[in-house]
Amino acid sequence: MGPGPSDVDPRVLEAMARPTIGHLDPAFVALMEELKALLRSAFRTENPVTLPISAPGSAGMEACFVNLLEPGDEVVVCRNGVFGDRMRANAERVGATPILVDDAWGDPVDPNKLEDALRAHPGARTVAFVQAETSTGVLSDARTLAEIAHAHDALVVVDAVTSLGGTPLETDAWGLDAVYAGSQKCLSCPPGLAPLTFGPAAVERVRGRRSKPQSWFLDLNLLLGYWDGDGGRTYHHTAPVNALYGLHEALRLLDNEGIENAWARHARNHTLLRKGLERLGLPFVVREEARLPQLNAVTIPEGVDDVATRRRLLDEHDLEIGAGLGAYAGQVWRIGLMGYASAVRNVRHCLHALEAVLGERGGS
Amino acid sequence: MGPGPSDVDPRVLEAMARPTIGHLDPAFVALMEELKALLRSAFRTENPVTLPISAPGSAGMEACFVNLLEPGDEVVVCRNGVFGDRMRANAERVGATPILVDDAWGDPVDPNKLEDALRAHPGARTVAFVQAETSTGVLSDARTLAEIAHAHDALVVVDAVTSLGGTPLETDAWGLDAVYAGSQKCLSCPPGLAPLTFGPAAVERVRGRRSKPQSWFLDLNLLLGYWDGDGGRTYHHTAPVNALYGLHEALRLLDNEGIENAWARHARNHTLLRKGLERLGLPFVVREEARLPQLNAVTIPEGVDDVATRRRLLDEHDLEIGAGLGAYAGQVWRIGLMGYASAVRNVRHCLHALEAVLGERGGS
């Protein structure tokens, strides 16, 4: 119950143990087609360019930056946590100029600040933000941020690593141009894959590049030669066949449940956990209306030893919760309720374990 | 029995289906340490910087190029097949200048040409070559090529994707500076991971860079913050936990067998297959002394339909063999005997299936 990887459904684990077949085998190609359709459904998009990058979510982020930006481009990066800052780092590695829109950790991205930044930098053609900031548990308003970006003729790159499958994400309805996610959060798949979708404007941007993307491995045009169904498959890299079995199964389970039902389940279990955490005197970092149901960041009470407490939870209660990242190290715990792990049994187990370990402090 | 992914040992598949735990869990950190030690043993090295990249072999190649080269650097790239040409593409994406040493497809890299290239380009400080060219089945002499490079004060980058675990590879004894491999060939693990080792001179090169590597995801200094045991682990990306379970198990099985025994097994089964292929009138592409035992490239006989034959092998005999890549498309088949799949039962099955399908041509 940390910030991911989340617990994996046993059916997904079983799928990953199926015999490996060739990455160009007709049976595997059929699975790829199903997988793309299931991913489109999860991203709520009709984008033909929807595929999993063969590497973790961080590589999904890098895939967006290396394909959509060229050296010298200005890009507005909204930064309200670790992953916003990682976007800045990615922009710099591409040779682009990041224009930072900073909000305090725990606050959502402020749309007014984005508006101001785009007015001040009319040359910026890209806006990047994190919908669900895993370091703080805050939800930003992707729809509004995208509207502002589009009004200034900029595309949006959205980090949905922690949101996909757990919180409403509407790629098409909100006009999100490029969205990447991770397999190991609310999809409840092991880590290692980064679902990605590029809308028409993003694809047009990639096709019109002046230079080749600096990464061969993440070059979208080369990737599409393998993942695109039209006119046969061209070998690019060897796809991680068994990991893709797992993602396929995880998406099939999500589809069976219905993504709106999954969102509602995440919200319900969050409410249950929230009540318990409040009873235990663990205050949330994020104000109520901007909290992510799947990632609950709470302030560690005065006098409680962070590392020792998490170690006891792990050793005595078989429970992992997440440490604080970056500015929150030692200050915050992050409790995940993601995908398969967003279940009443887990909420109860977590609250009992926290009560047992914290209760021994003697009623502070 | 294609060019990889190879058949995966059921014990490796079982390992991959173990419950996912956190990438910072103490139990997982212990597994990481074992994995690094097992990788060192497979690479025959004492290099502390030995770890798996969380992406396929192509990303292992890119990790070497982005970390060891800077824009404007000259790099000698030996090209005798598809993967040598991919090295050229990687060098260009980094902004380096590739100096090409070309040999015909099916021939090993000619050490004399490398010597000439280094004399003609005294500024080149890096030499890149493929030890086992998967597109042709040819083995190049990594030891001699490294000696020549070192005599000219250049580091070597070695593609050992198809060689690791199947053919002698001596990272330390041959002085190889940077070597990358893939999980899905002679290690008989599913695709998705790229074992990598950097020797002291390569690490010194990385530490002395003037600019940051252009990839954040593949930045070795950042990766070491997570993989290096000294002073705790810093989160970089979320490691592909279950894929690493699989690699750990595959390396444990290799260690149990003994890598020299594994090399001998690959050689034995190659000899058995070779005799059968010759009986069937399927000539090898590569001359005898430079053949890879784990990848047998043979010329498709006149009048035989490549695609239809491979399709029949798959549909009627449950057997995948590899198509020709690049210049060899439609001309060549590539029969893999890699790792777990390098077994007498597979040699017999392959020969029987080929005989059944080709025999119907009516004794040409």
Image: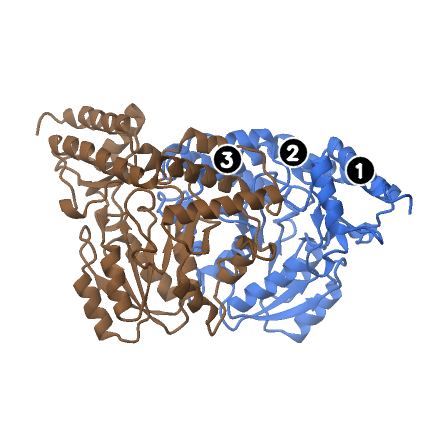
Chain colours: A blue, B brown
Is residue B163 visible in this depiction of the protein?
A: yes
Say which residue label 2 marks.
A258
Q: Which chain is mark 1 on?
A: A
Measure how far apart labels 2 and 1 are at the Cα level: 28 Å
Q: Quadrant of residue A285?
A: bottom right
Say which residue label 1 marks.
A351
Q: Which chain is mark 3 on?
A: B
Q: Secondary structure at mark 3?
A: helix
Report the side of B57 relative to A290 (left or right).
left
Q: Nearer the viewer, mark 2 or mark 3?
A: 3
Residue A152, horizontal then vertical, whole percent: 64, 67
Report the side of A317 relative to B356 (left or right).
right
Q: Quadrant of the C terminus of chain B?
A: top left
Vertical order, B82 against B285 (above or below):
below
In this rendering, do the residues under marks 1 and 3 share a single chain? no
Give the mark nearest the N terminus, 2 or 1: 2
Say which residue label 3 marks.
B16
Residue A273, horizontal then vertical, whole percent: 80, 39
Vertical order, A204 against A233 (above or below):
below
Query: Residue at point 40% right, 68% down?
Result: B69
Looking at the image, which is closer to me, B182 or A163? Answer: B182
Query: Residue at point 43% right, 34% down?
Result: A30
Looking at the image, which is closer to me, A316 or A335? Answer: A316
Measure how far apart labels 2 and 3 are at the Cα level: 27 Å
Vertical order, B295 against A207 (above or below):
above
Residue A235, horizontal then vertical, whole percent: 35, 47
